[in-house]
């Protein structure tokens, strides 16, 4: 009887391995701007020190689902990304968990020294309202290209998250454009 059960178990196909995440479709004529980031000037306000901006922004780290950027004292994050040369920003890809991922994202071109106290004093160059489906996709969002032609730095303000919880998590931030 034991031999029959073993044979039946051997005949049962093994579960299929999980499908790999779909590759990002980099917009035509654009490149990933990660190589143009001035890493010495990158800052993130209100980040959890054990889950910092490098996890979401730096190549290889940002593709590891186990690594992420997390907010610390509330859901807001303020990220400053300077570039080593002037770039043209075309689109951005932001991935995160469907419940704790960012919802309202405001992008500011060439606004330095912003803080939580003055972030609402300036009109954003563009605003994104991300849905849970968008956070799960591996698809860039096209920005108002005319507003991002001569970008020396980008400030990203994560205003809130999908569930209204105190922690926002971001698995990946990718910026696409040209030099």
Image (cartoon, rainbow, N blue to C red):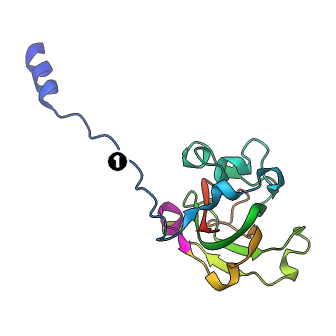
Quadrant for residue 122, please give it: bottom right
Q: Residue 67 vs residue 78: left or right?
A: left
In the picture, the quarter occupied by the N terminus is top left
Between residues 88 and 3, which one lies in front from this camera angle? 88
- Name of the residue lying farthest toward the top: 2
Nearer the observer, 139 or 13 = 139
174 inside magenta stretch: no
Residue at image coords 58%, 44%:
60
Residue 16 in view (yes/no):
yes
Q: Is residue 107 left or right of residue 41?
A: left
Q: Can residue 75 be seen?
A: no
Query: Can you give x and y, in whole percent of width and height, for residue 44 in the image?
Result: 80, 56
Measured as percent of width and height from the top left, residue 2 is found at 12, 14
On the picture, is 159 further left or further right than 6? right
To which residue does mark 1 refer?
19
Q: Quadrant of residue 120?
A: bottom right
Total count of labels: 1
The x and y percentages for residue 137 are 47, 63
Magenta stretch: give its range: 134-141
Q: How crowded is mark 1: few (under 14 residues within 10 Å), some or many (20 or more)?
A: few
Secondary element under disc 1, as helix, strand or loop, is loop
Q: Is residue 98 above or below residue 64?
A: below
Quadrant in the picture for the C terminus: bottom right
User: Image quadrant of residue 161?
Assistant: bottom right
Magenta stretch: includes residue 139: yes
């Amino acid at each position: 009887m034991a031999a029959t059960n073993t044979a039946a178990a051997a005949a049962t196909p093994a579960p299929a391995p999980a499908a790999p995440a779909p590759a990002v479709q980099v917009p035509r004529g654009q490149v990933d701007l990660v190589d143009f980031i001035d890493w010495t000037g990158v800052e993130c306000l209100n980040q959890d020190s054990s889950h910092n901006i490098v996890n979401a922004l730096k190549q290889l780290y940002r593709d590891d689902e186990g690594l992420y950027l997390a907010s610390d004292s509330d859901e807001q994050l303020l990220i400053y990304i300077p570039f080593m040369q002037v770039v043209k920003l075309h689109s951005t890809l932001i991935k995160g968990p469907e419940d704790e991922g960012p919802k309202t994202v405001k992008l500011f071109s060439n606004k330095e020294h912003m803080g939580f106290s003055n972030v609402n004093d300036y009109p954003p160059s563009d605003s994104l309202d991300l849905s849970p489906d968008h956070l799960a996709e591996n698809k860039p969002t096209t920005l108002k290209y005319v507003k991002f032609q001569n970008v020396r730095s980008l400030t990203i303000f994560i205003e809130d998250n999908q569930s209204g919880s105190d922690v926002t998590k971001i698995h990946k931030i990718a910026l696409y454009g040209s030099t």
